[in-house]
Image (spheres, grey):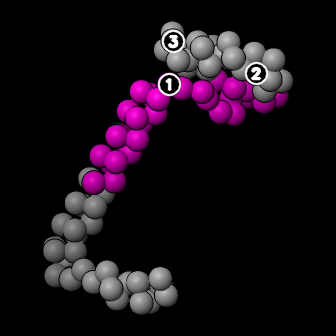
Amino acid sequence: MKLGIAEIRNNLADALNRVIYAGERITLERRGKPAAAIVSLEDLALLEAIEDGEDVKGAKRAIAEMKRKGEKPIPWEQVKEELEL
């Protein structure tokens, strides 16, 4: 379902019910172009799990590359000190 930003103001309760109870995904448009989306918490959790998985893959690739180059990781305490955290 697509709704304009102005439309959502008048139909927010209905839109939320459609997302929560019917599992719909609602795209909000501004000037006819997609601007944002309203999704269920289940969809959000799935998106976050996918992002987390990609982060883990990226970290593993970075560690493998460091090992391949013979580099050593920078200790967290040193990073905090350099960033003044």
26 or 32, which lies in front?
26
The amino acid beneath tag 2 is: Ile
Question: Which residues fall within the magenta stretch?
Answer: 27-56
Q: Is residue 47 left or right of residue 1?
A: left
Picture quadrant of residue 51: top left
Disc 1: which residue: 40
Point out residue 60 in the picture as x, y percentages from the top left corner. 22, 60
Name which residue lies at 73% across and 26% down: 29
Point out residue 9 in the picture as x, y percentages from the top left corner. 80, 23
Q: Quadrant of the N terminus?
A: top right
Residue 22 falls within the magenta-colored stretch: no
Closest to the camera, between mark 3 and mark 2, is 3
Disc 3: which residue: 21
Name which residue lies at 69% across and 33% down: 35
Is label 1 in a helix, a strand or a loop?
loop
Q: Residues within 10 Å of mark 1 (few under 14, many from 20)?
A: some
Is label 3 in a helix, a strand or a loop?
helix
Disc 2: which residue: 8
State whether residue 59 appears in this view. Answer: yes
Name which residue lies at 62% across and 19% down: 16
State whether residue 3 appears in this view. Answer: no
Contact flag, marks 3 and 1 (Cβ < 8 Å): no
4 relative to 47, above or below:
above
Q: Is residue 33 left or right of residue 26?
A: right
